Image (tube, rainbow, N blue to C red):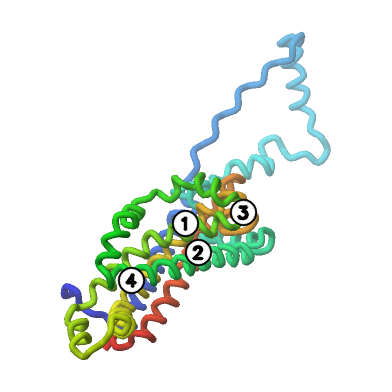
Amino acid sequence: MRIRQELTANERRARGLAASALALALWVAITLPVFPAPPAPAAPPQAAPVGTSPGASQAAGAAASSVDAPGAAPAGAPGPAAAAASSPRRLPLIPAQILPSPLAVLKAVAYLHTEEALVRSAAVSFFRVTVGFLLAALVAIPLGIFMGAYPPLRAALEPLSSPLRYLPISAVTGLFMLLFGIGETMKIMFLFVGSVVYLLPIVVESVAGVDQVYLDTAYTLGAKSRHIIRRVLVPGAWPGIIEACRVIYGIGWTYVILAELINAKYGLGYLITIAYRRGHIDWAYALVFIVLLLGVGTNEVFRQLQRRLFAWREA
């Protein structure tokens, strides 16, 4: 295989399916009960009741063994309990308390759907992520375009906005609770801040990265500044902006779990918290996979949008 060799769409799809099938087969293999369990420790001998002489206990035992109850099994035949105990118990390579089997995860999805309002929680999480992202885009995209177009404005605001990229958003959750309470507003603002601090610098760099030749040509043709922003800078930076939106929207799915830890009645993060509190590890795995599926689905929507808007990049 050559370095950076291009693959066709069918080749990429085939390799992706093969990798997924291999991962699923490995998951099944390490969760199958194939290893014999260690033998159970032998029960200690029972002591004779207090006040019973050894001769009396031996005589009682001999009398009990010499007289068989009607319909009882012969003395040498094993009973049902002994037969069940004699069959070896099998354990998986990784205990189910750490990694449940795929079948257990599928059963957990079915139970969460019927008993824990899974669809409603997924819809609530999707709404929160989308609203937080849209608010971030409404602020970051216009502001980033002007910062990229006017260097004095960028020089004034960048020292304030750039350090926010290193803000540990999970460490200021208490501050969001003080400012916005513990209701829905806090969750939306948490997602808004977590998205806007990353989206704004990327928009600025996308606008600033438009080739200066296009601007000089527009000025030569007599274009005004507002025309250059609308006809040159924005179209030139738009592919990078959409790509940044695709990445930042995916980051929102990581933050929504933190936002829904606090005073949430519905949401995937709320269900994950309940799963850990109740010790249902299969629930947690099922919910994590659902978050991944939603993230992959929205990512594919953005990719299709990019292909339609910027078909010239594929040529």
Residue placed under numbered mark 1 in the picture: 255
Q: Number of callouts in the render?
A: 4
Disc 3 marks a residue whose amino acid type is Gly
Residue 25 visible (yes or no): no
Q: Nearer the viewer, residue 119 or 239?
A: 239
- Mark 1 or 2, nearer chain start: 2
Q: Are marks 3 and 2 in contact (CB under 8 Å)?
A: no
Q: Secondary structure at mark 1?
A: helix
Quadrant for the N terminus in the image: bottom left
Gap in Å between the C-alphas at discs 4 and 3? Answer: 34 Å
Residue placed under numbered mark 3 in the picture: 183
Disc 4 marks a residue whose amino acid type is Phe
Residue at image position (45%, 77%) is: 301
**Mark 1 crowdedness (10 Å alpha carbons): few <14, some 14-19, many ≥20:** many
Gap in Å between the C-alphas at discs 1 and 3? Answer: 16 Å
Q: Kindly indicate the quadrant of the structure image that contains residue 305.
A: bottom left
Q: Are marks 1 and 3 in contact (CB under 8 Å)?
A: no
Q: Secondary structure at mark 3?
A: loop
Residue placed under numbered mark 2 in the picture: 132
Q: Where residue 4 sits: x, y (%)? A: 19, 74
Query: Can you tell which of label 1 and label 3 is closer to the viewer?
Result: 3
